[in-house]
Each structure stands twice: as C-alpha cells, then as structure tokens.
Image (tube, rainbow, N blue to C red):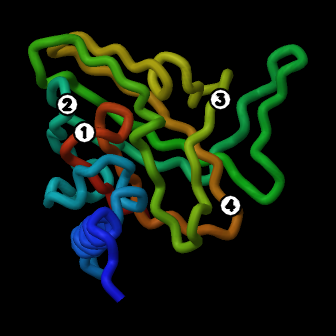
Amino acid sequence: MRLPTPARTLAAVAIALSATATGCGSTDATEPSSASAGGGGGSQDGGAKRLAMGDSTTLKGLHGSMKVTVLKVEDPMKAPPPRGLVRETPRKGFRFVGVHVRMTNAGDAPYTDSLLNGSRLATDIEKAARPTVLLGGKCRSKGFGTSARIPAGATKTGCLPFQVKKKAKISAYQLTLDSGYGPETGTWAVG
C-alpha cells in the first residue's frame, strides 16, 4: 500500500526524529548523571574536582570564580534552640547535618548565590539527603545558604544545613556554583 505524499513525508520525519532522539542524552553507565553529581551540567564535561575534607579548590561559575574550602561536616548536628514559638526539628526518621564551608571570591565582581541550590550530599541510600532551611542556630540558612553575597576578594565562612535519613551514610559533599548551573563541581570525600 502506497501512502499519500503528505503521510509519506510525515512518516519520514517521524523516522528521522526517532533516529536522532536515540543518539541524544545517552551516557556511559560509569558516568554519573548531573543530578547525582551536584545539579549542574559541570560534572559530565569533566569539570568534577575530587578533594579531601579541608582541601581548597577554585570553582568556576557562570559569573566568576570562588576559592572553596570544606572545613568539616557536622554529623549529626544539634537542632537549633527554640526561639519563642519556633522549634526546628528534623522530619521523623531524619537528622540534621551541617556542612561548614569557607568561600573566597576570586573574581573581580561581587558574587551572589543561593548555595543550598547547588549543594548535594552523596549517600549510600538514594534520595536520603536534601538541603533544608533553618531559621536559627549556628547553621542558619539566611545570609549564606540562601543568599550569599561575597564582594570581590572577600572571604565568608558559613554552614549549609541538610536533612539526612538516620540510617544513611554520607560519602561526599558536592558543590556547583550558581545554584547548580556552574561548569565545575567540587566533590569532597566525607569520612
């Protein structure tokens, strides 16, 4: 049976699109996906930097560079003390974890970022850790985790809070600048 000309054209386009689509987005089985490597596309293009706790590296962002040092991972971290009626506790079955980071703006312009968006904890249980917002305590999110503003040449130290399943073991902390969209990801081994 011969297809009419418009149907034949449509069938040819569908075949061409399906052939093109099968070649897009495939990754090697040993290469981590961007979601597991820190959010941005930086890790797939060879931009991942593997480091030990206390090591410093300079990560490139979309709008500048930052020298980043992960000082320590506080696991578990105490819940912030109650403030009036506000009592912050982890969800049932979870614990608080704080990642203490020092950042120096290596660029020539002010740097602004929501660091929690580009932060990940790698764990032995899938989806066991997620950044969280804390209003009080020594690991409060405001001013560092949700709205870091670092002038050119300045250094800022802060804490990034997470909620992690109680049974999950943390193996690494990962940071990609610019809310996870920067070209490079730093990975610091934990433990």
| Image coords of residue 56 (percent x, y) | 20, 44
Tell me the distance, in whole angstroms, between the alpha carbons under discs 1 and 4: 28 Å
| Left or right of residue 81, residue 154 in this image | left
Residue type highlighted by circle 2? Leu
Q: Residues within 10 Å of mark 1 (few under 14, many from 20)?
A: many
The quadrant of the rendering that contains the N terminus is bottom left
Q: Of the residues shown, which amino acid type is indicated by label 4?
A: Lys
Which disc number belongs to residue 165? 4
Q: Residue at x 24, y 57 (%)?
A: 43
Q: In the image, residue 153 lies at what x, y percent?
A: 15, 15
Residue type at tag 3: Leu
- The disc label shown at residue 62, or none: 2
Identify the residue position indicated by label 1 in the image.
182
Instruction: Please give left or right for residue 65 compared with residue 28 in the image.
Output: left
Question: Which of 148 and 52 lies nearest the eye of the viewer?
Answer: 148
Residue 109 in sight: yes
Q: Secondary structure at mark 1?
A: loop
Kind of residue at badge 1: Gly
Residue holding disc 3? 134
Q: Residue 103: horizontal and vertical position, in percent?
A: 28, 29
